[in-house]
Structures are given as structure tokens and as C-alpha cells.
Image (spheres, rainbow, N blue to C red):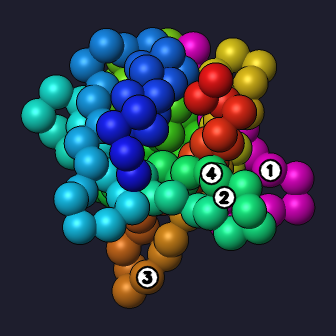
Amino acid sequence: MNIQEVQKLDAYLKRVFGTPRIRVVPHNKDDSAEVFVGEEKLGDLAVDDEDEDRSYNFRMEFELGQAVDIEQNKLLDMYLRRKFDNERIRVMGRLKKTDSVEVYLDEEFIGVVFIENEKGRRSFILEMPILEMDLA
């Protein structure tokens, strides 16, 4: 990942999430980077250059504890809005899918949150594809 890509990804994520506190920090050893809000690491960015089209994937893993009195989508809404300091983020269920929900910024689809249930623990993985044309 070169410096121009990192700068474009940094600007894109700031624009999408509406917060200037996001920053992309590249790894020196491979085609990947870490994404931070302030000093807190949010997740990782990886390059996907299969099919001759270069794209990127933002992946953020998190847990929400055992809040059973709040409906899952509302809990995810609250968490993502607070994490990115953006009230325009919303979570919607998917037709015929119970293992994931879609994430929108206003009316624009931005990613999917997959729900993992392993050994009694529930965790979440936000996957956000970023196409090269998104960075233009």
C-alpha cells in the first residue's frame, strides 16, 4: 500500500464516517494498514487485487457484552453511532439472513456486520468493502 493509497483511504473513511479523528496507519511489511479513531484501534484494512481490480476491505471486530434487554439492531446502532460519533449510521436486518445485518449511512449501504456465536460468546465483525472508484 503506497502513501497515496493510504491518504485516499484516510480521507475516504473520514468522509464516510464524518469524523476527522479517523486515521489510517500502513504496515511496512505488507499490503495492509490499521485504522484508528484517536489512539484506539478500530480494525484493519487489507488490499484485494484479485480480478485485476484493486479494492480494499475494512474489518472491525468487537463485542457488546451481555445487554439482553436491548434489541440487537438498536444495540448495534448505538454502538456504531457512538464509536464513529455519527448519528447518521443505522443498522437494518437482512431478508432471509439471521447471521448478519446491513449498515447504512443515511440511505447509502456501507457494509455488513456478521454475528458470531461461539462457545457462548457473541461477537460482531463489520466488513466494509471499499472500491478504488470510491477513493476518486
Question: Which residue is label 1 attached to?
Answer: 94
Q: Amino acid at mark 2?
A: Ser
120 to 31, vertically: above or below: below
Mark positioned earlier in the residue sequence (4 or 1)? 4
Q: Which residues are magenta?
A: 88-100
Whole-angstrom CA distance, mark 3 to mark 2, is: 15 Å
**Amino acid on which the number 3 mark rests in the picture:** Glu
Q: Are marks 4 and 3 in contact (CB under 8 Å)?
A: no
- What residue is drawn where x is 59% and y is 29%? 135
- Spatial CA distance of label 3 from label 1 is 21 Å
Tell us which disc is closer to us: 2 or 4: 4
Q: Give SS at disc 1.
A: strand
Numbered circles on residues, count: 4
Q: Mark 2 highlights which residue?
A: 100
Q: Position of residue 12 (x, y in %)?
A: 50, 25
Residue 118: mark in rendering: 3
Q: Is residue 37 visible?
A: yes
Point out residue 136 in the picture as x, y percentages from the top left corner: 64, 23
Residue 112 lies left or right of residue 81; in this view the side is: right
The reply to whether the magenta stretch includes residue 95 is yes
* Circle 3 residues within 10 Å: few <14, some 14–19, many ≥20: few
